[in-house]
Image: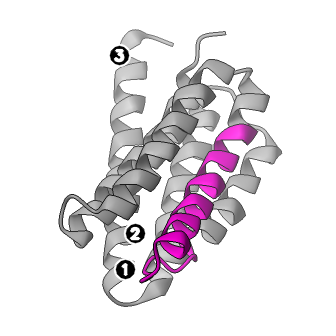
Amino acid sequence: MTEYDTVWQAFGAGIGLVLSSLLYSLGGRSGKWKRRFVGSFILAGTLVTLCLLRGLFSWWLLLTWPLLVAGYSIGYGADLLGVKVLKRLVYAITVISAGVVCAYLFSAWWVLIPHVGVGLWSVYLGVRNPVEAAAEEFFISMLLGLGLMMYPFVSV
């Protein structure tokens, strides 16, 4: 595999991540199925496709989709701070759990550490909401999904 192959694969990962995040944000407005099933499928499908292209495929990777569906199905809104933190924490944990599958399969524990850190930061961003909600959902989805896209590129 050449460095050009890696660049194009990373570009494809970015496209999948952007599409998934777009559907995550659109599904927050209407049509929850877009977020729950299509957005999560695109992210998991991008991950599996990357792993196939890089010779890293494992059937265990298919677990990432139900984990993402679970996280993408959590209601995002809440009036009470504690409930808001809990919902965003559950979302972050489910996406990071998909990362744990990858970290285990690829011995990519050094990617999992920042993935957890970004997950915690996403909880803060989601609770603090420093940007408009529609943009915040997109960016949080991008942040959490970025960790997933990094695992297939770990050099062993």
Q: Cβ–Cβ below 8 Å for labels 2 and 1?
A: yes
Mark closer to the chain start, 1 or 3: 3
Return the residue at label 1: 28
Tell whether position 78 is magenta: yes
> 18 above or below 106?
below
Tell which tag, 1 or 3, sits nearer the viewer.
1
Quadrant of res 8: top left
The one nearer the camera, 155 or 100, is 100
Mark 1 neighbour density, 10 Å: few (under 14) some (14–19) many (20 or more): many
The kind of residue tagged 3 is Tyr
> 29 above or below 73?
below
Q: Is residue 103 visible?
A: yes
Mark closer to the chain start, 3 or 2: 3
The one nearer the camera, 65 or 6, is 65
Mark 2 neighbour density, 10 Å: few (under 14) some (14–19) many (20 or more): many
Label the magenta part by its dominant secondary structure: helix
Mark 3 neighbour density, 10 Å: few (under 14) some (14–19) many (20 or more): few
Residue 99 % position (x, y): 64, 41
Residue 68 % position (x, y): 61, 62
The one nearer the camera, 153 or 126, is 126
> 150 above or below 124?
above
Task: For marks 1 and 3, give the CA distance.
Answer: 36 Å
Residues drawn in magenta: 72-101
Secondary structure at numbered mark 3: helix
Return the residue at label 2: 24
Is residue 110 rendered to the left or right of residue 85? right
